[in-house]
């Protein structure tokens, strides 16, 4: 009885968490997603209209004066019209396509070849960066301040005719300032998502010059997809002694965010699956900022300004910035990172097989992926799933195999749990004798019960530990499925085309047989139903509690969980259903080994008999 009570209390707490999740999070989030889809469609309709002129004021500098005005006027200009309005250098790599704007040498046109907006084969590729003249402007810019007409937002750089940036063909841009400074910018790109920008600055004049480098990531709009508390989206940076900085966009709306000067690290913006960051020269101090501007075109900006750099007459200095713009693929991000910790070396060495060029060593770049508080569970779990994926070629099968490994690791605890339950059943007649003997004397009954536990060598709380210890495992698995891009649009079998999205089927329209779409609030797919059935069978492995309140919880728990998990990623529901099935098998074997009767079939018979009598 005590063991059942502990088990039910643990599950009841989980139900409260899930109710709160559904009421305060999933419901509003699904409504926000619906509104976001409407807004996205409206934005596409506007973009399809003829280009319109605009007199929006040019954005001003940051409050610190560190970075010059962006010099942009955004409007309802189509993307194609914006791209045609300036000279460009094409970008073509295995993972990306786009172009560099020669006005300002901006990265403002980038699409990701491997990723599409939906699971449909003809769905458009993900567009990451957009020109500043469009309503969805999102771009990266590197320049200088300090002298007369140094390279900035309006600078027209020169490039060789028909220049094209590929992993094997870097491009060189040139600019000559009135002060006699010559800038030669060499841009190269690897096979993945990292650009290297090497500037050679030569003072060809007769006077000493002082310049300061700057860089910025600027975007006009926040992501349309609503954010969640389990994942950070917004400003991000590893800023040396400032450590990891994660700020929501709202924080910059309240006030500009400035940080201590540093000479290492990186900064930028991150979405759920994509990110744009700048890695400044790691030998020169700079001051980072995260800001929101309301003047001219409202925009968010992550920027930095370096300390002054002196150039004597005839002197040449070379400055190197790195720019990451692309998908947050785990092996790629880890490949760029410098992580000397034992944990980093262990997990980075286990994940993926994708080749990343050596020598970047970006400090703590692995933190670009939000592994969460349970990272010591989450990242190894992803490494294990990634291993099985490379073996099976299917992340759904990888989830099933990972579950088996987790069950094996927890087997000693589960064995103790089920052994404790078996022993509790064996002493049930003695417990009834104690209750009859002591009657309403609760203190005497409790003392006698504890003495009985001691004599029989039973730990009444042993059954709770496996449940409690699996909570971080469950949330870690949820984090892996929800956060990692490898799970995005990863298929299982049959109708599951995306393990990171809810099961698309619904019992309301007979799983697609009826010609209408089921309302979100009553959406209930095949896999949530399978999960509910397996949970029902698992709970029926134990006797129904005699207390009516506990019995009601015992009966309705699978139903509640079925509806709660209907809106969860399909991969997580598949894990839960498979875990329940393995638990039933495991419990049956252990209870049989201890000579205890398995209650499942008697409980099911009793349930149907009661309904027949009713």
Image (cartoon, helix red, strand yellow):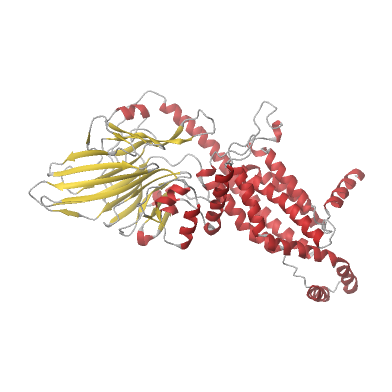
The number of numbered discs placed on residues in the rendered structure image is 0
| Residue at horizontal 59 percent and vertical 48 percent from the top | 24
Q: Is residue 218 left or right of residue 5?
A: left
Q: Position of residue 367 (x, y in %)?
A: 44, 54
Q: Is residue 311 left or right of residue 603?
A: left
In the displayed image of the protein, which residue is found farthest to the front? 391
Q: Position of residue 343 (x, y in %)?
A: 48, 60
- The answer to whether 502 is drawn above or below residue 470 in the figure is above
Q: Is residue 97 left or right of residue 418?
A: left
Q: Position of residue 529 (x, y in %)?
A: 71, 42
> Which quarter shows the N terminus?
bottom right
In the displayed image of the protein, which residue is found farthest to the top? 50
| Residue at horizontal 71 percent and vertical 31 percent from the top | 510
In the displayed image of the protein, which residue is found farthest to the right? 613
Q: Is residue 114 visible?
A: yes
> Which quarter shows the C terminus?
top right
- The answer to whether 47 is drawn above or below residue 392 in the figure is above
Q: Relative to the observer, which residue lies in front, 405 or 546?
A: 405
| Residue at horizontal 51 percent and vertical 37 percent from the top | 36
Q: Is residue 357 left or right of residue 475?
A: left
Looking at the rendering, which quadrant does residue 338 occupy?
A: bottom left
Q: Relative to the observer, which residue lies in front, 584 or 359?
A: 359
| Residue at horizontal 49 percent and vertical 48 percent from the top | 352
Q: Position of residue 364 (x, y in %)?
A: 41, 56
Q: Relative to the observer, which residue lies in front, 204 or 350?
A: 350
Q: Is residue 22 visible?
A: no
In the displayed image of the protein, which residue is found farthest to the left? 206
- The answer to whether 557 is drawn above or below residue 44 in the figure is below
């Amino acid at each position: 009885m005590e063991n059942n009570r502990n088990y039910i209390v643990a599950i009841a707490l989980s139900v409260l968490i899930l109710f709160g999740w559904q009421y305060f999070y999933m419901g509003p989030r699904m409504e926000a997603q619906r509104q976001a889809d409407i807004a996205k469609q409206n934005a596409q309709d506007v973009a399809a209209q003829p280009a319109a002129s605009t007199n929006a004021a040019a954005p001003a500098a940051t409050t610190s004066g560190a970075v010059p005005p962006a010099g942009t006027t955004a409007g309802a200009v189509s993307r194609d019209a914006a791209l045609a309005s300036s000279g460009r250098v094409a970008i073509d790599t295995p993972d990306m396509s786009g172009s560099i704007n020669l006005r300002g040498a901006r990265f403002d046109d980038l699409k990701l070849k491997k990723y599409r907006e939906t699971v449909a084969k003809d769905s458009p590729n993900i567009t990451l960066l957009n020109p500043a003249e469009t309503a969805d402007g999102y771009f990266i810019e590197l320049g200088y301040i300090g002298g007369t007409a140094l390279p900035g937002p309006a600078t027209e750089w020169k490039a060789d005719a028909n220049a094209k940036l590929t992993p094997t063909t870097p491009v060189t841009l040139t600019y000559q300032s009135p002060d006699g400074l010559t800038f030669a910018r060499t841009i190269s790109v690897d096979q993945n998502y990292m650009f290297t920008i090497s500037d050679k600055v030569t003072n060809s004049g007769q006077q000493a010059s002082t310049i300061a480098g700057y860089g910025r990531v600027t975007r006009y709009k926040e992501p349309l997809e609503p954010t969640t508390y389990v994942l950070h989206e917004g400003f991000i940076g590893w800023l040396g002694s400032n450590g990891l900085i994660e700020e929501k966009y709202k924080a910059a709306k309240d006030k500009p965010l400035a940080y201590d000067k540093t000479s290492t690290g990186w900064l930028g913006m991150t979405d759920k699956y994509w990110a744009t960051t700048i890695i400044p020269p790691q030998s020169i101090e700079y001051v980072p900022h995260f800001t929101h501007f309301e003047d001219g075109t409202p925009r968010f900006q992550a920027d930095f300004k370096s300390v002054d750099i002196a150039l004597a007459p005839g002197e040449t200095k070379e400055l190197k910035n790195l720019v990451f713009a692309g998908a947050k693929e785990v092996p790629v991000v880890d490949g760029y990172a410098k992580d000397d910790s034992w944990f980093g070396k262990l997990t980075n060495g286990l994940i993926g097989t994708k080749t990343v060029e050596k020598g970047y060593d970006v400090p703590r770049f692995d933190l670009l992926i939000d592994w969460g508080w349970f990272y010591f569970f989450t990242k190894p779990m992803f490494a294990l799933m990634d291993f099985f994926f490379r073996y099976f070629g299917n992340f759904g099968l990888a989830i099933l195999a990972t579950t088996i490994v987790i069950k094996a690791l927890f087997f000693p605890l589960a064995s103790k749990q089920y052994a404790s339950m078996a022993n509790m059943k064996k002493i049930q007649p003695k417990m009834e004798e104690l209750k009859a003997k002591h009657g309403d004397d609760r203190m005497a009954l409790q003392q006698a019960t504890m003495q009985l536990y001691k004599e029989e060598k039973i730990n009444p709380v042993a059954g709770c530990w496996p449940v409690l210890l699996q909570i971080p495992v469950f949330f870690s698995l949820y984090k892996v499925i929800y956060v990692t891009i490898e799970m995005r649009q990863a298929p299982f079998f049959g109708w599951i085309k995306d393990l990171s999205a809810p099961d698309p089927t619904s019992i309301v329209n007979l799983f697609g047989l009826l010609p209408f779409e089921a309302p979100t609030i009553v959406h209930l797919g095949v896999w949530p139903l399978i999960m509910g059935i397996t949970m029902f069978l698992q709970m029926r492995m134990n006797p129904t509690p005699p207390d009516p309140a506990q019995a009601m919880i015992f009966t309705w728990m699978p139903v509640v969980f079925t509806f709660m998990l209907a809106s969860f990623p399909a991969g997580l529901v598949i894990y839960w259903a498979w875990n329940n099935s393995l638990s039933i098998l495991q419990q049956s074997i252990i209870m049989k080994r201890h000579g205890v009767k398995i209650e499942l079939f008697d409980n099911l018979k009793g349930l149907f008999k009661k309904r027949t009598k009713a």
